[in-house]
Image (cartoon, rainbow, N blue to C red):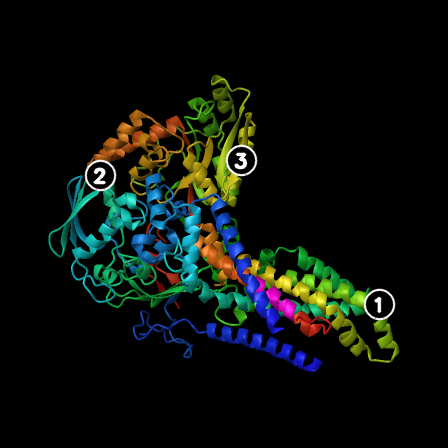
Amino acid sequence: MLNYTVKRLLQLVPVLLLISVLVFALVYAIPGDPARMLAPPDASDEEIDRIAERLGLHRPLPVQYGDWFLGVLQGDWGNSISWGRPVLPDLLRRLPATLQLAGLSVLFSVGVAIPVGVLSATKQNSLIDSVSRVGSLLGLSMPNFWVGMMLILLFALQLRWLPASGRRGFEYLILPAITLGTSGMATIMRVTRSTMLEVIRQDYVRTARSKGLSERVVIYKHTLRNALISVITVIGLQMGFRLGGTVVIERVFAYPGLGQLAYQGMMHRDTPMIMGNLMLFATMFCLINLLVDLIYAFVDPRIRYG
Amino acid sequence: MRRTKWIWLALFLSLSIAIFALGCGAAEEPPAEPEDPEEEPEEEPAEEEPEEPTRPQIVYVGVSSEPHRLDPRFGAGTVAARNIHTLVHDPLISWDDETLEIEYVLAEEINIPDPQTYEVKLREGVLFHNGEELTTADVEYTYNTLRDPDAAASNFSHYEPIREIEVHDDYNLTFHLDAPNMPFLYRLRADIVSKSYSEEHATDDSPYGDEYTNMNPLGTGPFKFVEWRTGEEIVLEAFEDYWQGRPKLDQVIFRPIPDATTRTVELQTGELHLNEEIDPVQVEITEADENVVVSRRSQMGFQSLGIHVNLGEPTDDVRVRQAIAHMMPREDIIDYVMHGLGVPAYGPIPPGHWAHEPNVPRYEYDPDRARELLEDAGYGDGFSAELYVIEDSVRVQLCEIIQEELSTVGIDVSINVLEGGAFWDQMRTGESQMFQTGWNAVTDPDDFMWRQFHSSSVPPHGANRQFYQNPEFDAVIEEALEETDQERRKELYSQAQQMVVEDASYVFIYHHERALGVSPDLRDFEYSIYFCFRDLMNAYLAD
């Protein structure tokens, strides 16, 4: 297991390297010039060129990439073009906020989705089943920024139960986490239900029932555990998407996380900021995948990593 | 064996929950209270609420975007940063928001013996937040940074005309300009920074100390900088020794909230006292809420449709351009797109401004006249045209209305919606047949007249993206640049406005307004288009 983990971690290096090259090239392919964004809207070309030169943007792309890469190796992620200061401390300062938000939203979606999915599968075609199916369809089809807006209008403006924006305590996390978790919850719920239904028809479940085990044991020990592999795969994927979702959700809730920084970086074509952000996102995505693979072994004794 | 695995998993999960909870706890730290609550600006009325102390004088301001550079030398290009600069710093001069008449701030007196010499006498006894006294060395240092091409400070071109800054003593200095330049007076509004403080933090990488001062600004303004938690808030605190007297407010806290709806909700629920900008769509709903006062301020600018005059047929014909101008349904646009936030514009300079000229040719909405003009020009059957607009819902809607109107006279417009960077790249090519742009906060008329209409300002040198080149017009604004007599300047700019409107390389649509949300408890505050929240130095919260 340890060998496997180390091997997987080593594999991260070429993956991240490739991502960094790709992203760097992509940022330059998007129209728009960072120097232009920094200059006043009516600035002349001379003024813009001067700014570009000061930022080192006039150099060939491979040189700029090399410069950035060597810096990263020495722990210097470059200075943000728009903020004019090192990128790394800002990224690290905001990382916990985004992790909390993404983590809480996963807890929320898993916490709701699995019980409801199980219930829905065991009571197939009942009222509960219909309600949960309609609910998950809604959850999937509502755009998350809209869900956020509606939650703000309901819970912050009408009922005044929860704050609408900021991050000054746990209650500030609730609405954004629910918003971020809604679509994931819907997906996980659907997968749980359909996998449970598949497993429930297996021979060994019938055997378990016929040997007189209680329904509880049959469902949770024999059915759910066997259904869990596909559910965990979906949860892992969802966590990855969740990181992307923060870009939109953090803006709606003015939540001070990485997502907002990523958005601002993009708007200003702030290459060091975008690179820093995306490298963090990419690393987290890869780590989540690794974690999911490791959890497989916990859940399913048949899976072993040599 | 199997059981231990589950225990591990459970442990892992509970650990991660604990970490989240812990992290949240750390974030719970309340915003710092002002250190000196003794100075209560308002007498506590002896009413029946003994448990309630006098309301803390802390104002929360919701702003749409977070500033990036808090040093005014480097951040003055964005409103987000000016929100902070104008409270932490003082400029030499400011002006009245409506008439644009000059008011002295750090300058006690300014003499202009000839239009290329500006003699400034500084106010004495003004202190920086670190206790040092303001002298001409600080003013000289600030302006020298601004005009250093290697510093890449904001608005470099504004300070390019300075040839030399001559310091006579601690309180007297003279700006010598390359050439006569009357609009330069308005350039003396740059916020002054401390020389010793900036130099103390200078490094090889940042010779002007801006890597530090952008995060820790220091000035002579009514509020001093306390703390910036990026993405969350910027905390400013009353400066006890402010030369105009300590502000009544103890703290001003800026919170960046990018979403307009969220910002409005926060104001309605009392979490904010000021909302920098209400989306036009939300103005009516917000006005209906008694917990909010909606205040409208002219943006002192215009929104316009630019039409290229030098890109071949058919827009090189002035009659075609005038026909387009006659198809502009200004009132409808203001009603349906801006939800009432604007007044119709027939020329560039907004009403109220000293250079506003009401007697320009007015292209009222008149499809018959437009058809006539098109027929005269030989385009009775219409033509097709390209229109460029930046990705922004209000601007795109505006262009769709224009497209719809022009289609009724046979002009088939295709709209190209471009995202910010791509739009400005397109503008730089100087090959856009029609484009929608605007101008905010007009100061001296020369400001935009030169950059948008002078022959020498065609891309890549300036913003004359419609390639308007009229020697007569050039001569008039060149004369106005040097003219010292205010009446004569006004006259010259009247002529210039008439020419610009006559030639219709720009069709002026409306002078836009900004809607601000204000808590009814906040008293004695007026927002300024030029100086943002600076008036908070006079404001207070009523009980």
Position of the C terminus of chain B, as image quadrant, is bottom left
Q: Nearer the viewer, residue A54 or B199?
A: A54
Using the image, name the chain to which the residue with label 2 belongs. Answer: B
Q: Earlier in the sequence, mark 2 or mark 3?
A: 2
**Which residue corresponds to the image point at 47% horizontal and 21% vertical from the top-left?**
B373
Residue position marked by numbered label 2 in the rendering: B181
Q: Nearer the viewer, mark 3 or mark 1?
A: 1
Few, some or many residues within 10 Å of mark 1 (<14, 14–19, 20+): few
Residue B6 percent across, percent down from the top left: 67, 79
Q: Is residue B532 visible?
A: yes
Residue A118 percent across, percent down from the top left: 75, 69
Q: Is residue B242 left or right of residue A201?
A: left
Residue position marked by numbered label 1 in the rendering: A201
Residue B59 percent across, percent down from the top left: 39, 64
Q: Which mark is residue B415?
A: 3
Q: Nearer the viewer, mark 2 or mark 1?
A: 1
Type of amino acid at the residue the image marks with label 3: Ile
Do the dots labelled 2 and 3 sit on one chain? yes
Quadrant housing residue A293 = bottom right
